[in-house]
């Protein structure tokens, strides 16, 4: 089978992958037949999941605009995904062309496509990295070159923590990231949660994801709070993403309660 020119060397096209499945769900084309088939299975298990993906992406955009309004000019987007519409650098560099962004993802397609679209942008880069190893990300030469850890940084962990197991100790990972940040820095998260009264087949979704290299799990608002630890939640706290500083007229559907969002600040 011949691969498209954007496919990085060695990419495994026999196993569905979270980054490419999400790309397909958002209408992108950096995905393979195995990802599309998998996405269609997810959609038949939970038809609302496509809307949830768009809603999560809209949350990311509102968070970044809100952070930019607080004066944040440095962004470390971990689990950034395959670039699509409304990428962080597009949002923040429209506000301040000097703003810097480092995208980090474990997936080769996400990193190579990120590098391709950022060629020529001296203030944004995409690197390979694993959230389970914060010190390696923070010590990466491209991070060091673009992000001054003495000044406030926004670390974005949007729709990525639910790919980590409890054995990965997400609270410790966020603690290690936050420890390296200047006071006044922020950590933004979104996370899949079980909303039982909606009757969603969460177990079917999580079982399906077990076929990918990154299985998925739900967490409760309390568990998300534990992940954020001593960071101070900004208003309105840990809420469904559609309730986090919604834009006027933003549609709210029940399924969208299945993703929690929050922004927390390192005290000054
Ligand atoms: C659902 S996408 C979210 C993309 C983007 N943050 C957004 O919300 O639109 C999740 C991304 O997390 C990445 N990912 C999963 N586990 C990761 C890890 N341990 N370290 C870094 N990235 C990871 C996947 O490759 C995928 O691109």
Image (spheres, helix red, strand yellow):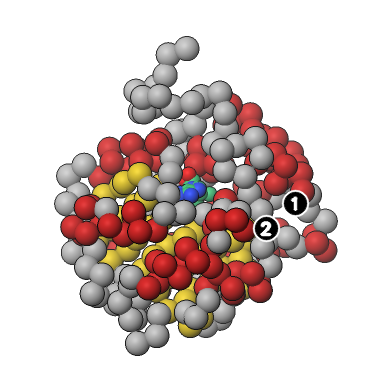
Label 1 crowding class (10 Å Cα cut-off): few <14, some 14-19, many 20+?
many
Decide if ligand 1 comes within 8 Å of the CB at mark 2.
no
For residue 172, side relative to residue 84 (left or right): right
Q: Which residue is most to the top? A: 1
Q: Nearer the viewer, residue 202 or 92?
A: 202
Residue 170: x percent and y percent? 54, 62
Instruction: Determine which residue is flagged by label 1.
Output: 202
Residue 234: x percent and y percent? 49, 81
Q: Nearer the viewer, residue 59 or 187?
A: 187
Q: Nearer the viewer, residue 140 or 34?
A: 140
Q: Name the residue rendered at 41%, 54% in the picture.
A: 133
Q: Name the residue rendered at 64%, 69% in the picture.
A: 223
Q: Is residue 91 visible?
A: no
Check contact, mark 2 vs mark 1: CB within 8 A: yes
For residue 144, side relative to residue 54 (left or right): left
Q: Name the residue rendered at 69%, 50% in the picture.
A: 48
Q: Quadrant of the C terminus?
A: bottom left
User: Which disc number belongs to residue 218?
Assistant: 2
Q: Is residue 156 visible?
A: yes
Q: Name the residue rendered at 70%, 35% in the picture.
A: 41
| SS state under label 2 | loop
């Amino acid at each position: 089978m011949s691969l498209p020119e954007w496919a990085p060397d060695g990419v495994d096209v026999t196993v569905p992958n979270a980054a490419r499945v999400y790309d397909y769900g958002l209408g992108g084309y950096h995905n393979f037949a195995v990802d599309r088939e998998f996405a269609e299975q997810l959609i038949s298990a939970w038809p609302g999941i496509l809307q949830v993906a768009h809603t999560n992406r809209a949350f990311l955009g509102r968070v970044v605009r809100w952070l930019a309004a607080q004066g944040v000019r440095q962004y470390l987007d971990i689990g950034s995904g395959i670039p699509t519409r409304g990428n962080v650098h597009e949002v923040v560099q429209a506000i301040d062309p000097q703003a810097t962004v480092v995208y980090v993802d474990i997936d080769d397609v996400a990193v190579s496509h990120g590098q391709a679209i950022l060629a020529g942008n001296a203030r944004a880069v995409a690197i390979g990295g694993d959230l389970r190893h914060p010190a390696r990300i923070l010590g990466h030469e491209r991070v060091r070159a673009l992000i001054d850890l003495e000044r406030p940084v926004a670390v974005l962990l949007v729709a990525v923590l639910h790919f980590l197991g409890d054995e990965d100790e997400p609270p410790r990972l966020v603690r290690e990231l936050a420890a390296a940040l200047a006071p006044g820095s922020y950590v933004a998260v979104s996370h899949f949660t079980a909303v039982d009264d909606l009757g969603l087949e969460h177990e079917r979704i999580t079982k399906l994801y077990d076929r990918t290299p990154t299985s998925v799990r739900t967490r409760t608002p309390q568990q998300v709070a534990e992940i954020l630890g001593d960071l101070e939640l900004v208003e309105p706290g840990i809420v469904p993403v559609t309730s986090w500083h919604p834009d006027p007229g933003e549609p709210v559907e029940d399924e969208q309660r299945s993703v929690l969002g929050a922004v927390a600040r390192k005290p000054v």
